[in-house]
Amino acid sequence: MKVLNTVIELQNQIRNMQSDSVGFVPTMGALHNGHISLVENALAQCQVVVVSIYVNPTQFNDKNDLKNYPRTLENDLELLEAVLRENDIVFTPDNKEIYPVEDNREFHFGNLDNVMEARLRPGHFNGVAQVVSRLFEIVKPDIAIFGLKDFQQLAVIKALVSQTGNKVRIIGHPIIREDDGLAMSSRNRLLEPEIRKNASIIYKTISAASAMISDSDIPQIKSFVKNSIGKINQFEVEYFDIVDDTELIPVNKRSEMVIGKRYFGCIAVRAGKIRLIDNIEIGLV
Ligand code: PAF
């Protein structure tokens, strides 16, 4: 694999390879097996794969979160070396390469701007849209792969691509979980041991909530989720919403759910000092 830091080097390298298909996996580093599985998906579909590692400051609405975000470049490169091929690229730009001038663009995504993560992290998705559109402009990928754990982010990126008319095909990749069910995330390594041990409650609870849809209505399911997780020391549910998979409009009653549409239960939990998100499909029976 080649590790490149500048836009010019990256674009020359991609041009020289004259590949039919460029696959792209954008990341903020602190890589884990969830990321590696996105990379493997891209490798199976494309002649050249670009993995970017860039902690994008514009998507952090909390300065402390940006400061504490894990940075593990050496380990990331080792993990990628084990899977990438000779011509694949790891792109590790600095801020000046991504934002040679300040990015003041404002994006609007309708309902996606008003629910769940958007409500609790104002400006977050605008920053994601800034960096992803910039990275797409630099890499010009044929396909780009994003994890389904960041469910709302995936919906935002699909909306961004349709607004900008970019031809890139966006692929959502299934959530990869630890043995105890916790969704893999770069933030898991920031959990204190006792909190990490208890964090399996999140997936256990949303799995049970998904099964409840056959005989309970949504308000009962929501209270169950809130209580089941909230009774664990230092755990608090910020939201648990059941939403459709395109506009992410929350449903408040089972009777509002439409057969033929897909619904997901999306959760954010404050676990000690760390926020964790997860989701699960809620199938109508
Ligand atoms: O999901 C992430 O890691 C980031 O939000 C992304 C898509 C790499 C943009 O910085």
Image (cartoon, rainbow, N blue to C red):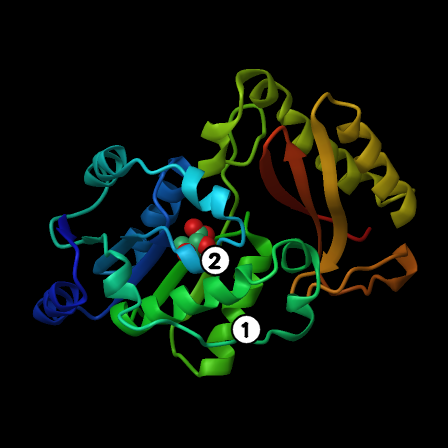
Residue at the outermost left position: 16
Q: Nearer the viewer, residue 71 or 41?
A: 71
How crowded pointer 1 is (Cα within 10 Å; few <14, some 14-19, many 20+) is rated as some
- The amino acid beneath tag 1 is Ala
Residue under pointer 1? 159
Q: CA distance from mark 2 to mark 1?
A: 17 Å
**Label ID, residue 59:** 2
Q: Quadrant of residue 78?
A: top left
Identify which residue is drawn at 59% across, 16% down: 194
The reply to whether residue 244 is visible in this rendering is yes
Q: Is mark 2 within 8 Å of ligand 1?
A: yes
How crowded pointer 2 is (Cα within 10 Å; few <14, some 14-19, many 20+) is rated as some
Q: Of circles 2 and 1, which is in front?
A: 2
**Label ID, residue 61:** none
Vertical relation: 277 (above or below) 201: below
Q: Position of residue 259 (x, y in %)?
A: 80, 64
Identify which residue is drawn at 26% across, 32% down: 75
Q: Nearer the viewer, residue 145 or 67?
A: 67
- Secondary structure under tag 1 reads helix
Q: Nearer the viewer, residue 163 or 114?
A: 114
Q: Nearer the viewer, residue 126 or 155?
A: 126
With 115 as the anchor, is 275 left or right in this view?
Answer: left
Identify which residue is drawn at 75% across, 30% down: 229
